[in-house]
Amino acid sequence: MTPRTLFDKVWESHVVHRFPEGPALLYVDLHLVHEVTSPQAFEGLRQAGRRVRRPERTVATVDHNVPTGDRSLPLDDPIAATQLDALAQNAQAFGVELFDLSSPRQGIVHVIGPELGLTQPGMVVVCGDSHTSTHGAFGAFALGIGTSEVEHVLATQCLVLSKPRTMEARFTGRRSAGVTAKDLILALIGRIGTAGATGHVLEYTGDAIRALSMEERMTVCNMSIEAGARAGMIAPDETTFAYLEGRPRAPGNREWGPTVAAWRTLPSEPGATYDRRVDVDAAAVAPQVTWGTNPGMVTDITGYVPNPADFPTADERQAAERALAYMALAPGTPLAGLPIERVFVGSCTNARIEDLRAAARIARGRKVASGVRAMVVPGSQQVKAHGEREGLDRIFQEAGFEWRNAGCSLCLGMNADVLRRGERCASTSNRNFEGRQGAGGRTHLMSPAMAAAAAVAGRLVDVREWEMESA
Amino acid sequence: MTLTPFVRHTGKCAALPRANVDTDQIIPKQFLKRVERTGFGPALFHDWRSNPEFELNQPEARDATILITGANFGCGSSREHAVWALAEYGFRAIVAPSFADIFTANCCQNGVAPVRLSGDSIDELIRRCRGGRGSYRLTIDLEAQRVTDESGFGSSFSMEPYRREMLLRGLDEIGRTLLEESRITTYERSRA
């Protein structure tokens, strides 16, 4: 038999039917739901008199528009409150489990899925959110869908999809100190561009990927969509199984052995082929920082703002010119040293406990520079509680960081956490699009340690110099 | 939900010659709090519209139903609100060298045709659109899979057959899938 990839195996085991025109009806094991992309889907069900086919495979939480300040106060945004109420009513009416603002398990949908053990190897996972690619870190085929497809999955537990092509991204070599999973994925996107993997499922392979923790793998897979990919995947291994064992929704004692045995059959077989392949030398990757208005506009922290005239095509030259005008940057400016006013440690990319520890290690015993507002927004209430047990909250607060409640927050600024016009932000999130963090706000994407160092310095800095001091 | 089928459409064009237009630009986050599918049209390209120079603010772009734009249109967030905003504003088709995957799916769910032409064709259409000063029109024939204008331009395009069928017939995808419900049940039983 032809050797198969991880993706081939997950795909084939979920095909319910093949439509004559080509696409498959693909079974969905886990459907994650949040307040922003679901109300119209539930309303559609209601109007058509349809039910949720598999409520037990559907889990909802609130994350996008929720306040991250004091949760004992009523929401001061009535439209956001309406959206939260709608989800609560829909969850109740359709029998869907909901982790709401009062739940100790509430958090960013892509943080709580893995944390609860809901996300498992070999699954098909969907959510009305492009960063669903995060769950691919477990060897699941996990993809973002639109609201009409959310309604389709609610009604049928299936998704209609043509089989994407595959692309292997092989990372080899040992990362140097101060270089994180965030830097690996940003370096890849910088290389292949924001449409570099459109129509493909990325599988991340190589010893540099094997060496990553589960949380680091989630950071890598999370940004697959920023390369245009349908999904990103990493084959499950001992690291995956160790992470999942004992989690509340992971298979229990009795099923654990046979389930893990089945998961062990998932990895791509030797000789399996991909439609495309890209190699990255992980040892050569430096800490990355974006200079422009999409995640592909990225370079080493030791680098410079590029000159638009140096880009090969007219489209790229024009895009770089627009980006530099928006970012208020001149060609040739060194990125290290660029003054910032805001810092955001958070988002489904980088708000797990290891991310907070990395930022805290830099913040410990230091102070946020005067004139800088720095926020730490844990990815879930459980991550927050975990951080507090370890005393991270005190480290951050003593350094002058705000320690907030869980949510998407300043990653997309749907709540009160937004940049003001012209503010420049060192951010651990995933998108530096114009206005993403607030109209006129200027985003530089980087790792948690780099963002924390920027908060202390009041400017972008090369964290490698700091890691040596604090080691 | 029943949709207006998209078979053949002739309409006025507007050009937005830039690549990587992301869904955050098409509909910024502050407008995503609505619980309805309507009300997004006036917020289309909200931040860009505050600039009087913006292409869609020009009188030539008024009443356009076809948007000609750059590669990787609709990248980023999965928000279907972007397509709802484009449709409500009046666009029935987007013509570009390439589209983001989730955006393509969202278009077809809402009767908006994502039409892919080569980069050279797009450059040519943008020249013609600018030269037409508000009178440039295209015909998109989805049945024949051809884009033509009244002055000799003609180009074929391809589209995934399933998506094309959805657009041509204004299909309710859920209704269609539920015709296969017994297969879903069989699949579920086989895994239990």
Image (cartoon, grey):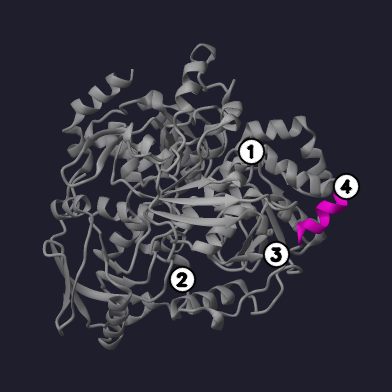
Specify the amino acid type for callout 2. Answer: Trp
Tags 2 and 1 on a common chain: no
- Left/right of residue A251 with respect to residue B143 in the rendered view: right
Q: Where does the magenta region start and end?
A: A462-470
Residue B167 sits above or below residue A296 on the image: above
Q: Position of residue A273 (x, y in %)?
A: 40, 47
Name the disc covering residue B48, or none: 2
- Left/right of residue A136 with respect to residue A471 in the rendered view: left
Residue identifier under label 4 = A365
Q: Residue at x 67, y 79 (%)?
A: A332
Q: Nearer the viewer, mark 3 or mark 4?
A: 3
Q: CA distance from mark 3 to mark 2?
A: 30 Å
Dominant SS in magenta: helix
Crowding near the residue tagged with mark 4, few <14, some 14–19, many ≥20 C-alpha atoms within 10 Å: few
Q: Is residue A257 magenta?
A: no
Q: Nearer the viewer, mark 3 or mark 2?
A: 3
Residue A226 sits above or below residue A10 on the image: below
Specify the amino acid type for callout 4. Answer: Gly
Tags 3 and 4 on a common chain: yes
- What is the chain identity of the residue bearing mark 3? A
Residue identifier under label 3 = A301
Q: CA distance from mark 4 to mark 1?
A: 27 Å
Specify the amino acid type for callout 1. Answer: Ser
Q: CA distance from mark 3 to mark 4?
A: 24 Å
Residue A28 sits above or below residue B93 on the image: above
